[in-house]
Amino acid sequence: MDKIRVLIVDDSAFMRATLSKMLASNDHIEVVGTAQDGRVAVEKALSLNPDVITMDIEMPVLNGIDATKEIMEKCPTSIVMVSTLTSEGAELTIDALHNGAIDFITKKAAFTEVHGMKEELIAKIIEVGTSDSLRNKVKRGIQLNKNIKVQKSKDGTPETVGSAPMFERRITSTPHAGVAQQSATSRLTAVGAERMSEGKAGTIKLVCIGISTGGPISLQKVIPRLPSNFPVPILIVQHMPPVFTKSLADRLNNLSKISVKEAENGDVLQKGCAYLSPGGRQMELTRNGVLKISEGKDPNQLYNPSVNITINSAIDQLNSSILGVIMTGMGHDGQEALTRLHQLGGYVIAQSVDTCVVAGMTESVINANAANEIADLEKIADRICKHLNVNIASI
């Protein structure tokens, strides 16, 4: 494959040199430039046309959040934020994701820990840089700041939800002639359409959502559209490290008519409330609707939190009375549990490949024949509400 061309943006000369050395050690990555502030980053993004940009947040002249917004307006590019593992850093990172950044990694504070970033950094760059669906959407040049939407927060005041990032509109690739050359996305969409007629969701006592790369902005297109009288609890597993999930939960809670919180050990599930699994920990449903939040990584699961662990625990308690939703993200987390749910008679909605930032998670569920239906991002809230027999919230 072609090398992934990366622009590194950081106000620290040490960090620019360190990140450059880390990435240059991988044969699939080429560092095409560096920038010491957000203004230079915008200029170099325009002139160098990189595949991926690593973006620091706190910089002089123009910070990383504003630089991200400007880049997404002028030359949409896959941006990975490099954030400090603090409450303030988490808030700023969520803002950057809100402005169009694709994902983030956490910056190590101590000099001796910096090189511990190497494995995660390279994996993230390759994850983002090799995503065909994401690269195609970048090439389409969809502008970030078109169709700005405004909705009311809980106190009734207008609040900008944000712009339409490059991955939020459905883009269908130009079809090739002949069935043999039909794109994988088209085939998956066709399969999903057939599955939609296979059956209807039965009695639903719980909604479970699994999501990863591209999740924060995608969840903002689903959770705020659920009405205040939503009749069941919701469990959300978003792949994130500690600290960041609290900021995400607070953001969603402020935008939504239902309650959203970072789950705590001992929480008793309440209807009309969404519980976001804490970053770096596992969330399980136990008897009588009580949540168990545990430390430590399951040796059989790659992710912490894990979609598989949460949904399997819910199945153990509720059997098939669950509506499972798998959304954007790299990898296969959720496939095993949702396949089990589907086989037991539960109902599974998969986000359409075309509207995912990275389609690995949803594609794996579709390929496992575990999806009852496929829905575009903008339609997922509608589909959930239809199965729960409630009217979708107005925005």
Image (cartoon, grey):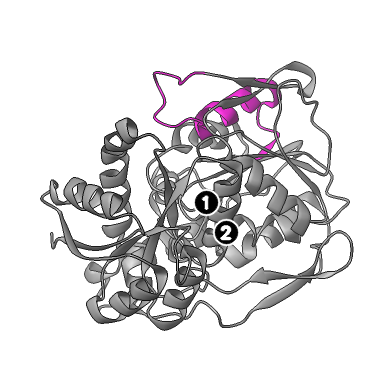
What residue type is disc 1 on?
Met
Q: Write down the region rendered in magenta.
A: 296-323
| 2 and 1 marks in contact (CB < 8 Å) | yes
Left or right of residue 366, residue 283 in this image: right
Where residue 29 sits: x, y (%)? 17, 55
Left or right of residue 347, residue 302 in this image: left
Question: Which residue is more in the foreground, 107 or 301?
Answer: 107
Q: What residue lies at 74% left-to-right and 61% top-to-bottom?
A: 225
- Mark 2 Cα shell of 10 Å, populated few (<14), some (14-19), many (≥20): many
Q: Is residue 35 magenta?
A: no
- Mark 1 Cα shell of 10 Å, populated few (<14), some (14-19), many (≥20): many
Q: Quadrant of the N terminus?
A: bottom left
Numbered label attached to residue 218: 2
Q: Quadrant of the C terminus?
A: bottom right
Where residue 189 sits: x, y (%)? 44, 63
Q: Is residue 320 magenta?
A: yes
Q: What residue lies at 65% left-to-right and 59% top-to-bottom?
A: 220
Question: Which residue is more in the foreground, 363 or 177?
Answer: 363
Numbered label attached to residue 269: none
Numbered label attached to residue 327: 1
Note whether 63 is above or below 112 in the view shown.
Answer: below
Q: Which mark's residue is nearer the viewer, 2 or 1?
A: 2
Question: Which residue is more in the foreground, 280 or 31?
Answer: 31
Q: Quadrant of residue 375?
A: bottom right
Q: What residue lies at 44% left-to-right and 80% top-to-bottom?
A: 142
What residue type is disc 2 on?
Ser
Please tell me whether mark 1 sits on a helix, a strand or a loop: loop
Labels 2 and 1: the sequence-earlier one: 2
Left or right of residue 53, residue 167 in this image: right
